[in-house]
Image (cartoon, coloured by chain):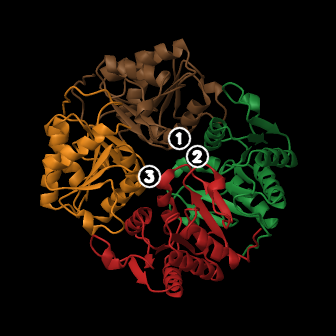
Chain colours: A brown, B orange, C red, D green
Amino acid sequence: MASHRRQMVGTQAAYVAVIGPGADATAPDTALAREIGRRLAAEKAILVCGGLGGVMAAACQGAAEAHGLTVGLLPGGQRSEGNPYLSVALPTGLGELRNGLVVRASHAVIAIGGSWGTLSEIALAVRAGTPTILVGGWKVEDLPGRPAGTLHRADSAPQAVQRALAYARRKPP
Amino acid sequence: MASHRRQMVGTQAAYVAVIGPGADATAPDTALAREIGRRLAAEKAILVCGGLGGVMAAACQGAAEAHGLTVGLLPGGQRSEGNPYLSVALPTGLGELRNGLVVRASHAVIAIGGSWGTLSEIALAVRAGTPTILVGGWKVEDLPGRPAGTLHRADSAPQAVQRALAYARRKPP
Amino acid sequence: MASHRRQMVGTQAAYVAVIGPGADATAPDTALAREIGRRLAAEKAILVCGGLGGVMAAACQGAAEAHGLTVGLLPGGQRSEGNPYLSVALPTGLGELRNGLVVRASHAVIAIGGSWGTLSEIALAVRAGTPTILVGGWKVEDLPGRPAGTLHRADSAPQAVQRALAYARRKPP
Amino acid sequence: MASHRRQMVGTQAAYVAVIGPGADATAPDTALAREIGRRLAAEKAILVCGGLGGVMAAACQGAAEAHGLTVGLLPGGQRSEGNPYLSVALPTGLGELRNGLVVRASHAVIAIGGSWGTLSEIALAVRAGTPTILVGGWKVEDLPGRPAGTLHRADSAPQAVQRALAYARRKPP
């Protein structure tokens, strides 16, 4: 059972995606994710993710501890593959294509750690013009390609959340 | 502002889609939708819909009155097109293809009134084997094709909700 | 091995979807589909379909006999599930959501016979405003809902092809 | 007008995606793409791409010069945005999500040059386990993350095509 605090109207809330490795997540990655989830919930942001384990589950766990709302867009067709900290678990059956929906559903993206799945989401977010904050993994200068104006770096959980929310609240839809 | 009651864990809740016309909804359709939304929320089911107006907004309004959780999978890329009773408003940018996601995300579907968009969702639900309850619009025998074992009829809001939840709780994913 | 006639430039060709039952197709349905495929190819139209058997395979077979180009948008991830008369077999992994892509890819739709999958495609096409010709199965008046201006009836393969191409050539994209 | 050589049956052909920048493509990128397209067509492979300009159009132009078959999965809903060298131009209306379909439709991917859109496709291909050949842009060691066993490098158009086809012919679906 989870309880939710009073939430904003859904069309007016800040939606922040937390992306990062599932099964391969490291302990520092998941610790960071959990703190980020907690801070997003404390700020009444809605946390969007791919719904599975590792960084995704840790971020949702943190958000649940602060009575926040979490949404998982699952790659498969089975709701049961979702982590137990999701408020809303949505099977999409789209496989990796659901990564694009995670980005579309969010005002800002926080990317924790490094994996190929995460990289595809970062690249999609940059293409979509969605502000993306890298924390605890790749540095902006590690990524190939020309520097993108929407790609930022944070050195800690509070800084990542503060930057993501600054972008989310500036540019609503 | 909306408040939510204590919810079930997201992977264990019952998810019920309410589908029906948006702009073209009739007054009896929206009255029925509102009562159905209220009853679904009272039963702690999560209401899934296409996120727009008419039947969708009325069902969400009813659910919000009973402090329920509502999810809108929006066809466009703008969150602002969502109705004000959504707890979670997710822009998909998929257009009408999002109808298939509404069905995939739900254990059971309640179809109110009649429209071509609704018909495509009913047909998708039947194909997916998702139990579908028709109420207030087409009768099962109005629909073309062979009778489908997952297609049912209800004559009132309480009966529609009771049937949808019976199916949702029997067949989890 | 299939050979193709000279084709139009891909952006300028007429694309016509042929939709209908797969495994459940009747002999009259597949005979009609084959003649429709042959006539579409003779007119240098590109045939789009869901890529599987029954009506889809028969239409592709007819088109292949007339050296036409056929495209199958397959529901699963395996190319091998495509029928042997496809020029281009594209696994999408989208399941039934690929029906929406079949409609989006086509200037006009010819619906043969009756099934729930077909009905969802008809409904999607009507919603998208794509001209749809019913032949050999449901009549326009069998379908529920208000009459849609883009839904037509044909009584034979030549009439279905002639009507579909008239619409396809009038309204390019 | 384009003519096509005799093609393999669609379910048995080799499908190779060529990905790379559109409007931002450099002259060396497009020269490389054109030669790659020509060589793929000479080998009777079907070229799959995102259907727009730059590297995509150059690869299709090369394939058309060798009478090959080219398929463009367009991001928008308008067929007219496709390049004039496409045999088959399919509007998807999925935006950047169509990148995932390009990968799913292909046995192997050749990535030319460097851009964020290309990076998302490379990352998706690596995640899907699809062999990916980098040529003329990033080196394997430029990309972040752990080395992926399906990511390869080629130094010329002939080498890129030879490697892509070796992978495509080894692993059918």
Question: In the rendering, at what x and y percent does residue A73 appear?
Answer: 43, 36
The residue that disc 1 covers is A95
Label 2 close to label 1 by CB (< 8 Å)? yes
Which amino acid does the dot numbered 2 rest on? Gly
Could you tell me which secondary element the residue under label 2 belongs to? helix
Q: Residue at x 55, y 49 (%)?
A: C93
Q: Name the subunit of mark 2.
A: D
Label 3 close to label 2 by CB (< 8 Å)? no
Looking at the image, can residue A11 be seen?
no
In space, the residues marked 2 and 1 are separated at their CA atoms by 10 Å
Residue B170 lies in what quarter of the image? Answer: top left
In space, the residues marked 3 and 1 are separated at their CA atoms by 15 Å
The residue that disc 2 covers is D100
**Label 2 crowd bin: few (<14), some (14–19), many (20+), radius 10 Å:** many
Which amino acid does the dot numbered 3 rest on? Leu
Question: In the rendering, at what x and y percent does residue D43 appear?
Answer: 83, 58
The numbered dot on residue B94 is 3
Q: Name the subunit of mark 1.
A: A
Residue A1 lies in what quarter of the image? Answer: top left
Q: Nearer the viewer, mark 2 or mark 1?
A: 1
Which amino acid does the dot numbered 1 rest on? Gly
The quarter of the rendered structure image containing the C terminus of chain B is: top left
Looking at the image, can residue B121 be seen?
yes
Q: Residue at x 17, y 47 (%)?
A: B36
